[in-house]
Structures are given as structure tokens and as C-alpha cells.
Image (cartoon, rainbow, N blue to C red):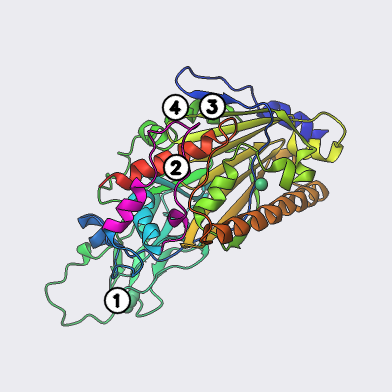
Amino acid sequence: MAAMAAMSMLLKPFISPPHYQTVRNPNKNPKSKPSSILLQSQSPFSSPLSSRLFSTSPISASASATDCLRLVEAFDPRIPLEEAQTPPSSWYTDPSFLDLEFDRVFFRGWQAVGFVEQVKEPREFFTGRLGSVQFVICRDANGNLHAFHNVCRHHASLLASGYGKKSCFVCPYHGWTYGLDGALLKATRIGGIQNFDVNEFGLIPLNVATWGPFVLIKLGKDVPPRGKLDGKIVEFEWLGSSWEILSTGGIDSSLRHVCRREYTIECNWKVFCDNYLDGGYHVPYAHGGLASGLNLESYSTDIFEKVSIQSCEGTSVESRENFDRLGSKALYAFIYPNFMINRYGPWMDTNLVLPLGSRKCQVIFDYFLDASLKDDKSFIERSLKESERVQMEDIVLCEGVQNGLESPAYCSGRYAPAVEAAMHHFHCLLHQNLMDQ
Ligand code: FES
Ligand SMILES: [Fe+2]
């Protein structure tokens, strides 16, 4: 009951702005969720900046840069959904294609990397990895948020690990010490060194911002001075015109983080995203339990610049358990390229999809709950168990698709126009980024 009450407060009706596309779907269902983080990127596609900041290594043997660009062109975003073919299977299997994706998709634009609660207090930090980029996010003693490459300027040791609270970062290798603002505070045993300016050996900063409960970083050389990053610009760059729907749709900072689950899946990262973006197509076939809690007839998809939002109403009463967990309306937002926000009942979970290889990814689930329910251990346990079951079902699907993509029998497929518009949109955005020098 409490869950239903909280739900009705948190999930406000969506307002449809005039400038996005809506696909109403007569026989739909929602999304899914499977598995877990990262991989080495070494690419022949790097821009001079990427080459400098992101150490690169020799070109993969499987395909040259030219071959990869030919693969990108094999998908034509100008062909309407009804006639379009899906991207060729090599997008999902070729290691060099992943190099290109790191360089042109993941190393550009804002990326969600964590949530604000992880660095709520001064001196808290967490680390992460995006391809070859190792990063650390921290809040200094004055409460300012920072992001840095998590690499010591002496001999490149990783500096911080995991998460926690520190007053400074001491390199585990030779003890060079950095402040939480990135400044090099102590370079041990460097007596006799010449032409060395301590001020030039601070940690290399990254752009960092927050939106609602999330922490974002952007890779690139232009890091504006503190306080100069315009939150509205970040919001629009990350969410486009969907920001209003998301901020009024119950995605806010009042929800409390409950737990994190990580899954490693033997599939290309896009297989997981595609599965999420099929408009609930697979739900009645693969998630019998979930389907009983959703009114699949009500499924709809709204497409924005770099975001698609699928939404679905819950069923009324037959499944009390499902209704408490799923509420009267569920929202599934996909934020290109790899972040999903699922808002249902008193719950919100996020899925961050991190490539670990051309056929492996990590999916990090973070679960957030209405604060009024954070002590209801029984409800939390039951909800997580149900969610876990859905993840396991999706993992089986995704790994099956990866095996099929690697079969010589398959090259590309087709879209079901009534349900798979968001998936097509995802592929068009990828094509656009990958073609962008
Ligand atoms: S690598 Fe960090 S102090 Fe030597
Ligand atoms: Fe699913």
C-alpha cells in the first residue's frame, strides 16, 4: 500500500512536447535487463587529442580503419524503418569496430558514470573505467566535485582503487601524493631532478557534472574552469528536449540508493541495448512473470534527440506483488549510448552498459527506492529477487543473440516497425557518431 501511495506521488503524468516522435504500440511490452563493465580501447581512429590523452595501441588485426568505415556505411539511416535492415552482424563481432565505437561514441559526449550519493560527503571518491580510460571522481574538502584520469604522473600507476573516503591520493607505487583537487602535493625522492615544475604534474582533469541523482563525465581536452560549466547546457547535451519529462517523471535525488548488482554478459554491448529497445516485443515470450504485471496494450515509445522513452501501464490487481513493485506506470528511458533509467512503482533502477570486448559487456544495476520504504527489508528482498529473475532471462536471450550473430547464416535482420522504433533510432545515432570524424 505504501508503495502504491509513493508511486502515485512520484510518477506524474508525462507531458508530450510537440517536437518528438511518439509511437503507439498496440501489442507491446517493456524492456529488460541483463549483465556488466569495460575493455581496452586501442584504435586507429583516434583524433590527435585521443591519441595524446588515451594511450592507443596497434591496430587490431581483424579490420583496418577503412574496413571499419565500410562496415559503418553498410547501415543506411536514410532508409525508413519499415524498409530498413538492421546493422550487419560485424557491428557486433568485429574487435576493430569496438575500437571505433570507443573513439567516436564513448570518448565523446557526456557519459553517466555513477550517482551523487557515492560522493555525497567531502573527501568521498569512487573510481571507474571506460575502455582504456581510468577515472576517479571525488569531492574535495570544500565540497567541490572533481574528476581526473586515475593515473599517476610519475610512472603511470593507477592511483586510487574502489571507493571510499580519503584526504589525499597517495600513489601505491612510489608515494607521490595528490590533493583531492588534483594538485601534486608531494613527489618523493626527486632530489636532483631538473626542469620539473610541480604545478605541471597534477592529475589530468576531466569534465564532470551532475544531473539529478547522476554523475556524468565527458572526455576531451577542454575542461572549463571550476564553476564555468553551465548546468543547462550539460542537461541539454545529455538529454536534449527529454529533460523535462525525465525531471518531472519521478527521476529525482530524493530516492535512496539500495544496492548495486553487476552482471558480466557474453555479448556485444549493443545486444543488451537492442534488447532493451525492442519496445517490449520480447516480454510476453521471455518474461512471463513480468508480463503479468504490465498492461502491454498501453505500451508507447517517445523518441527525442538522443533519448528514447518507453512507457507502460501496470495491470490492476491480479498480481498484488507485481503491482506493489511495478506501480501503475513504468517508464524506461534509454540515454544514448549506454545508460538506462527504469522508473516503476517506488523503484528506480539504472543500467550502465560497459563494453568489455566485442563479445563481452558488463552491466551495472543500481537500485534506488522511495525513502519511505528503505527499511522495508522484506519488500526490498522480494523486489530484487523478481528483478534478478528478469535479468537472468535477459542474459540468456542476449547471449543467444550473440551466438547467432556470429553464425555464418546471419548477416542482418529487419525491424518490427510498431515496436522497434527506439532500436532503429539507436542504430541511426550510432551511425551518425561513427561517421563523424
Ligand atoms: S608511479 Fe606513482 S609514484 Fe611512481
Ligand atoms: Fe527483457
What amino acid is at disc 4? Ser
User: Distance from label 4 to label 1 (Cα)?
Assistant: 44 Å
| Residue bearing the label numbered 1 | 155
x, y (%) of residue 72? 35, 49
The reply, left or right, for residue 374 in relation to residue 189 is: right
Q: Which is closer to the viewer, label 4 or label 1?
A: 4
| Residue bearing the label numbered 3 | 245
x, y (%) of residue 400? 62, 58
Query: Pointers 3 and 4 in contact (CB under 8 A)?
Result: no
The tag earlier along the polypeptide, 2 or 3, is: 3
In the image, residue 81 sits, relative to residue 382, either above or below, namely above
Region of the chain picked out in magenta, as a range: 66-94
Is residue 138 or residue 98 the one in the foreground? 98
Residue 71 magenta-drawn? yes
Question: In the rendering, which numbered label is found on residue 241?
Answer: 4
What amino acid is at disc 3? Ile
In the image, residue 230 sits, relative to residue 66, either above or below, namely above
The tag earlier along the polypeptide, 1 or 3, is: 1
Q: Is residue 392 visible?
A: yes
The tag earlier along the polypeptide, 2 or 1, is: 1
User: Distance from label 2 to label 1 (Cα)?
Assistant: 40 Å
SS type, badge 4: helix
User: Distance from label 2 to label 4 (Cα)?
Assistant: 20 Å
Task: State whether label 1 is within 8 Å of ligand 1.
Answer: yes
Image point (35%, 41%), residue name:
432
Q: How many marks?
A: 4
The reply, left or right, for residue 63 in relation to residue 309 is: left
The tag earlier along the polypeptide, 4 or 1, is: 1
Q: Assess disc 1: are there few (<14), some (14-19) or many (≥20) residues with their C-alpha within 10 Å of its C-alpha.
A: few
| Residue bearing the label numbered 2 | 427
